[in-house]
Image (cartoon, grey):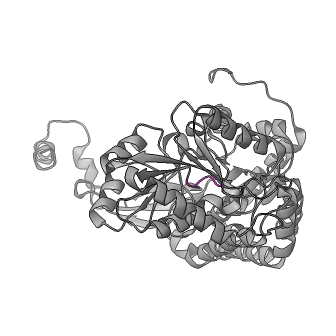
Amino acid sequence: MTSITTPPPVTSDLALETMFAAQRQAFAGNSMPPAAQRRQWLKSLREALVKEQDALVAAIDSDFSGRSRDETLIAELLPSVQGLRHAERHLQRWMRPSRRRAGLAFQPASAKVLYQPLGVVGVIVPWNYPLFLAIGPLTGALAAGNRVMLKLSEATPATGLLLKDLLERVFPADLVSVVLGEVEVGQAFSRLPFDHLLFTGATGVGRHVMQAAAHNLTPVTLELGGKSPAIVSADVPLDTAAERIAFGKNLNAGQTCVAPDYVLVPRNRLGAFADAYQRAVRRQFPRLTDNPDYTAIINPRQLQRLEHLLSDARERGAQVLDLYPEEQRQGRCLPPHLLLGVDDTMQVMHEEIFGPLLPLVPYDSLDDALAYINQRPRPLALYYFGYDRGEQARVLRDTHSGGVCLNDTLLHVAQDDLPFGGIGPSGMGHYHGHEGFLTFSKAKAVLAKQRINAARLIYPPYGKALQRLVYKLFIR
């Protein structure tokens, strides 16, 4: 790996550099866009998404070779449109300077925080939700008054081309521009001297993005992944927990960064939960063959990776249950699987699964379950199923994760008034809603004094009686 003290060789990419320079120049000419202009940007984008929703659904379906229309509407269009609407409604308040208190020792004075755009923001978009994970950061960056460059995933070419065309019709290139291309284009993109860079993707790739950004001292927001656990309590109704976990696990065929990665189940409820989960999955997807509700795995490489996780677990002694053993596989449709008897020798318990495979891990007490989680890298999400308020408080207090759902999965990400972000190996920084506006803004501290300057009383020469009185009053 290249040392962080030695910049990697930069591949000259005149098109990228020209695009970046145009945005930087445009920002210099309008470095504090008014609220009305920003709201118009957001409104125009929202209206374009609504108008082109059928084309966007079709493009994403093409890239996946089978993506559920409803899942695209629920998990991509709906949160994108609602996030834009939320920003439009609250933008005026977000932009308002924040009044702060000047210390008594420094009076007369006033203090406030001004929120200014950063400049040119870069966004690197992954393949699993190619629309929502482009529009979400774009919403925050535009609300904050920035120029934005988006690098779309090479794994979703149809969506990339359509989104590029859509955004070019809505915005001038010096406000929003879209970059397409393979891995080397993404590497060159991450080396541009952005004022902020947001990356969503795998933890390993995130390390390289952060390393590239470090050479320009570009601040980064990393939205990564990891193994997000779900805990089933000793007394929660199993059918309720299983149904909600099944939805969160199998949406987009598990190709979701906050999908439950494994479930901790009381040892004496393990078999009953496995049965309840199988029933829940079969209710939601009565069949897989020719079922438009069930999404395919994005490409052959990801399918091969998931099949390897299954074979590795089976060879090391896990009980692997195919929930649709009677059906012949079609294309890249991978059935949901349960894995029992798993242990830390298996790759499925080390890698983020990112597919419809669900390991079950038994535990004997809540203390054991929390210890199991805390001995592992901090996850992007954590899910607890149980109605005891005391146990809920313990889970919240005694674990660290990017976000939490109590008695549900995934839906915390869709709340416009909640921040979204990881912790440690699952990411850094936040966006969505107000936190997105703050991430893409410079909070400028302003202390203002007018004609009267009481501070001159503490100017040199030192040793005056009034100075000694100030020390006595304020240093205690």
Image quadrant where residue 389 sits: bottom left
Q: Quadrant of the N terminus?
A: top right
Name the image quarter holding residue 300. Answer: top right
Residue 109 visible in rendering: no
* Range shown magenta: 256-260
Of residues 366 and 198, the one nearer the viewer is: 366
Is residue 258 highlighted in magenta? yes
Determine whether, in the image, residue 450 is placed left or right of residue 419.
Answer: left
- Residue depicted at 22% across the width and 48% down the height: 457
Q: Nearer the viewer, residue 368 or 43?
A: 368
Image coordinates of residue 406 in percent, x first then y, are: 43, 64
Image spot of residue 7 (x, y percent): 70, 24
Q: Is residue 79 above or below residue 351?
A: below
Q: Majority secondary structure of the magenta segment?
A: loop
Where does residue 454 sit, x and y in percent of width and height? 25, 55
> In this image, 355 relative to 225: left or right?
right
- Residue 62, above or below 170: above
Residue 23, horizontal then vertical, whole percent: 78, 53
